[in-house]
Image (spheres, coloured by chain):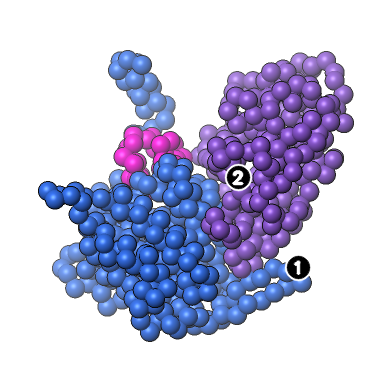
Amino acid sequence: MYVDQAIFASARGTQGSGYQLVSRSRGIDDSTATMLRDWGPSQGALLTRDVDSEAISYYTLGTDRIVVSRTIYGGPEYSQRGELEVFTRSIVANRKLLEAYDNNPWWLAKTVLTLGYFRLMRHSEPWMTEVDLPTRSLLGVRSAPRARIAEEPLSQALQSLQLNRPVALIGNIDVEHAMPQLMKCLGSPQRTQITFTTGMVPSVRRPFQLHLFPNASATLNSRLIKLGISPINF
Amino acid sequence: MSRTVDQNMSTTRFLAEGQKLQCVCCDAGIFTNDGFCPSCQAPTSLSKSVAERGTASGFISVLGASGAGKTVYLGMLLDMLTKGTSQLKGLPNNSLSVAVQEQTISALENRQFPEKTPNDIDQWKWLHCELNVMKRRKCFFDIISPDFAGEAISYELEHPGTFPVVDKVIRKSEGIVFLIDSLQIRDSGRDEDFFAMKLATYINNAHARTGRFGSKKAKIRVAIVLTKCDSCNEAVEDPTAFANANMPGFTKYLERNFAAFNFFSASVVGASATLVDRLGRVEQIPFHVSPRGIVEPIEWLIS
């Protein structure tokens, strides 16, 4: 199943300088490109300065399109300020694709990651080819939804999400364990509506409902509270 | 929704969420417990600070493309105003302003330029300081200037409404400091000229006036500052001639549409060098802090 992809990074080009959509496949029109740019993370968006930091994110564009993305540090940022650019590679697909993945965006993201479509790449060409995804998840196994989670923080997070309140899990979190647990307890239609990110700084321009942060800090907590996101310590 | 329901909801929010005040950027009603204005996303703490001071305040917008030097300019400006010049003296009014100054001066003292400003509005720093004009008796007023991300300005030019705070601040501005990278002007063809024309058009639309015989020139004062002139002597000798020679479209547009504009050259460091590390990261290293032409544009704007 062919889906679109795009890269959001920092460059100096004919369209201007700075963070922009530097490359995309032909199925992404200008309107979609604008929405991707609005969600696109720029300098300082990753929680830590560790060169191996990454964030996996999921959000929706309107009623019919979904986006899974991976944000990492890329090459040197073009403006010679000695930093590494924040590189985001996104897969843009019709919402119907999620049905083939049991309406589980985490499975979709992990499948894309496993297939290598989230890798860092040069972004010198403005156009990219579409990506061929399998019609079912390579990793997840369909199972009956679970009503409860044993771990208390995850249980609290689940309650907030079911009440449509944004929440952040902070602490020593095993994302590979926490996300499948949460997805399993959310109902099938609700899974597609809960936008999430693992490791990206919260921002008023990226209204994710679920944030996962492996480290806590006083500034992070105060920012979460300002943005109306409930922090839950792990 | 009926007015009665609106009033009840406002009352409920007031009781639950604190005092109501007016956003300093867009004049929308906000609550003190809101982190950011829901309309333009300006920080509530800024509006609260302005309301508490109760003195006249005005915006001075510092605009420019990504990498033009807005953060460095604002930080150095506040540092110099804090120390005072023969004509101006300034004091920061809140911690947001000190953060601008601290970020710039700390970076320069460590032989670095400050980090790139993120696109996220909630991470922008806002300068809010009290300005004292020394040669005028009891002349105090507050100036507010956000440290915009260059991309935010570019996005707003391409798609108006993307960053409403940019539009609101420019409309409320009583003066504009327009930063342009002199090295980009000299070395990169007409790109800077085109960007400057777009931004000038945007400013003109926000401050357009019409008279009996059609449109009139915008009254807002625009100080065009050519930055990084430590590496571009041509811009130092005669900034106006340099701009006329390298940005003909922009200068013609200014002459036609703005009643008051002036060119300045500025730099913050005496000299700099380029460092490349083993990962291929290229970094400009400032050698020593030697500010020139930082305060003069502000003095001209308020004269």
In this orientation, does residue B264 appear? Answer: no
Q: What residue is shown with label 1?
A: B279
Chain letter for mark 1 = B
User: What is the magenta segment's predominant secondary structure?
Assistant: loop
Q: What residue is shown with label 2?
A: A40
Give residue A152's position: percent from left, percent from top: 73, 27
When the figure is inspected, residue B187 is found, relative to residue B204, above or below; the finding is: below
Apparent side of residue A174 relative to residue B138 in the rendered image (left or right): right
* Colour chain B is painted in: blue
Q: Which mark is residue A171?
A: none
The one of B232 and A55 positioned closer to us in this rendering = B232
Apparent side of residue B33 relative to residue A4 in the rendered image (left or right): left
Letter of the chain shown purple in the rendering: A
- Give the quarter of the image for residue B130: bottom left
Give residue A116's position: percent from left, percent from top: 83, 44
- Give the quarter of the image for residue A134: top right
Q: Is residue B27 magenta?
A: yes
The one of A175 and B182 positioned closer to us in this rendering = B182
Give residue B210's position: percent from left, percent from top: 19, 48
Q: Which residues are magenta?
A: B21-48
Q: Residue at x 68, y 25 (%)?
A: A95
Q: Is residue B218 magenta?
A: no
